[in-house]
């Protein structure tokens, strides 16, 4: 759930500037468009690092207090899920940009490739009982 909330938060950042990015692209002002995209990515990365650190140091205690369960063993997975949520948000930014550029075929190819990689890795990781396999698969599935 934390990763999904971060993806929704990213949409709140992206939606207001979609028209601006679209106008910049169609006016061939690619440098300005890249500047806005870089700024948005920087904001997401800084927020992601901050939230990941907060999740690592305070997350299990807060969630343990809320749910009445000791969750200190899940400190690292919680932080990784937060990072995956930010990665999902950054992917949403680039998906929006590809849509503005009308490059839907690239998105379809990436989705199929992501599915195949996730399928193969899930079979390998689950059979070998790799710790935190679900987080690795979540990362890849977002791409």
Image (spheres, grey):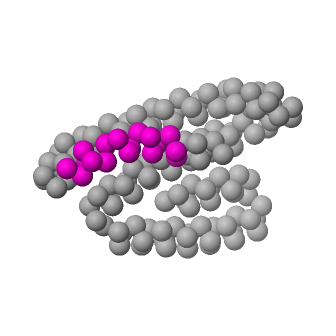
Q: Residue at x 59, y 29 (%)?
A: 53
> How many marks do you count on the picture?
0
Q: Residue at x 61, y 27 (%)?
A: 54
User: Where residue 25 appears, x then y in whole percent?
Assistant: 19, 53
User: Where residue 126 appears, x then y in whole percent?
Assistant: 74, 65
User: Where residue 43 appears, x then y in whole percent?
Assistant: 40, 34
Q: Is residue 34 visible?
A: no
18, above or below 104, in the image:
above
137, above or below 119, in the image:
above
Q: Residue at x 63, y 42 (%)?
A: 2
Query: Dominant secondary structure of the magenta stretch?
Result: helix
In this rendering, would 43 be left or right of 127? left
Answer whether residue 37 is magenta in the image.
no
Look at the image and give the residue range highlighted in magenta. 7-23
In this rendering, would 34 be left or right of 72? left
Q: Name the quadrant containing residue 118.
A: bottom right
Frontmost residue, 40 versus 127: 40
Frontmost residue, 134 versus 15: 15
């Amino acid at each position: 759930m934390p990763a999904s909330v971060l993806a929704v938060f990213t949409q709140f950042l992206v939606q207001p500037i979609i028209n601006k990015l679209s106008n910049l692209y169609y006016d061939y002002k690619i440098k300005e468009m890249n500047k806005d995209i870089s700024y948005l990515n920087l904001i997401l990365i800084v927020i992601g690092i901050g939230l990941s650190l907060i999740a690592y140091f305070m997350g299990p205690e807060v969630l343990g207090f809320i749910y009445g369960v000791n969750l200190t063993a899940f400190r690292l997975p919680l932080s990784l899920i937060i990072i995956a949520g930010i990665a999902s948000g950054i992917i949403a930014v680039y998906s929006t940009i590809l849509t503005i550029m009308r490059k839907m075929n690239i998105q379809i190819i990436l989705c199929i490739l992501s599915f195949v990689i996730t399928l193969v890795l899930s079979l390998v990781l689950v059979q070998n009982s790799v710790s935190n396999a679900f987080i690795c698969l979540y990362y890849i599935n977002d791409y």
